[in-house]
Image (cartoon, helix red, strand yellow):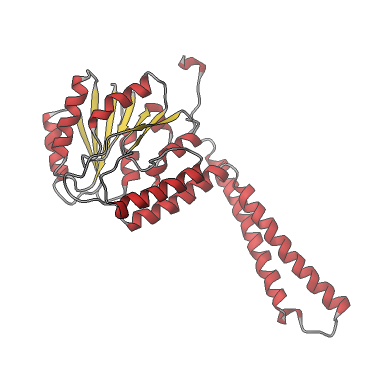
Amino acid sequence: MNISVVIPLLNEHDSLEELQDWIVAVLQSNHLSYEILFIDDGSSDDSWEIIQKLHAKNSAVRGLKFSKNFGKSQALHAGFEQTKGDVVITMDADLQDSPDEIPALYEMITNQGHDIVSGWKKKRYDSFFAKNLPSKLFNWAARRLSGLTLHDFNCGLKAYKSEVVKTIEVYGEMHRYIPVLAVNAGFTNIVEKVVIHQARKYGKTKFGMERFINGFLDLITIWFISKFGRRPMHFFGFLGVIMFIIGLGFATYLGIDKLFLNPSGRLIANRPEFFIALTTMVIGTQFFVAGFLGEIILQSRQNKGRYHISDTTDS
């Protein structure tokens, strides 16, 4: 199979049939074998009934339904596990992503050898203050922290080599950072392509302040995992040593002062330096323990981790 199209959705019943017809027309006209996977992320409308009808008419259309809304990342992860195509295309269900882009994305993966082709909606038809401005700020911060020079991390229209989606694990709300997860797994051939962005035809955007804040929190998480995910002791151990040294310094000062410099002075327990020493030494010890636990967990997952490894037999 040439292409698997994975489409996560939530309450998009108005657009599903039109989107399916558009995708099928594009793929058939380009003589590409395909499957279309609709991932219903707990819709409360009749999206699932429409998906079932589409499947009855076209066996290449498949659907997965979550019992409740788990999020886009979980929907994509479930879809990735089911894909059979050599190239996996992800797109949103709201018709703002154009299926006409699929053949070019497919060619960039198969003929040019890229691991990921990420869409860039250079010209957008969203509200400037409600979505465009937050997206620009978010993408700027994502470039700074991740080191990837992509203009549009949040674009749903992307193409992946099949082994990429079978290797990475998308969780939480990390769907925005799949290219970063791919780099961490060893897939570094990532490029960007300007794609058409269309005005929303049905429904309303699900982008809000909560998603904007969560996006930045996830960005901090992915930065930490990228930098210290394979060596947690380097982070927690360093902080633990610094804090412990500070506490030990205060404790040493208090001991010398009480024993030799000012024996008749206040009790050590009545001095603020005592609480500084106690607190920093306890926190330093906790950081150290966190680092050790991180290393133990990492070691236990070594044999279960997902890595991209080339084998000479592949050629």
Q: In the picture, residue 152 is in which quadrant?
A: top left
Q: Is residue 147 left or right of residue 22?
A: right
For image coordinates 40% across by 27% down, the residue present is 163
Q: Is residue 18 visible?
A: yes
Nearer to me, 146 or 298: 146
| x and y, in percent, of residue 22 in the image | 17, 31
For image coordinates 13% across by 42% down, the residue present is 49
Q: In the picture, residue 178 is in which quadrant?
A: top left
For image coordinates 68% across by 71% down, the residue present is 276
| x and y, in percent, of residue 176 in the image | 38, 43
Q: Is residue 47 left or right of residue 72?
A: left
The residue sitting at the right extreme is 260
Nearer to me, 149 or 228: 149
The correct choice, above or below, for 163 with respect to 245 in the image is above
Q: Which quarter of the rendering shows the N terminus?
A: top left
The correct choice, above or below, for 59 with respect to 315 in the image is below
Q: In the picture, residue 229 is in which quadrant?
A: top right
| x and y, in percent, of residue 156 in the image | 31, 39
| x and y, in percent, of residue 186 in the image | 50, 31
The correct choice, above or below, for 232 with respect to 280 in the image is above
Nearer to me, 299 or 168: 168
For image coordinates 20% across by 49% down, the residue present is 43
Nearer to me, 42 or 3: 3
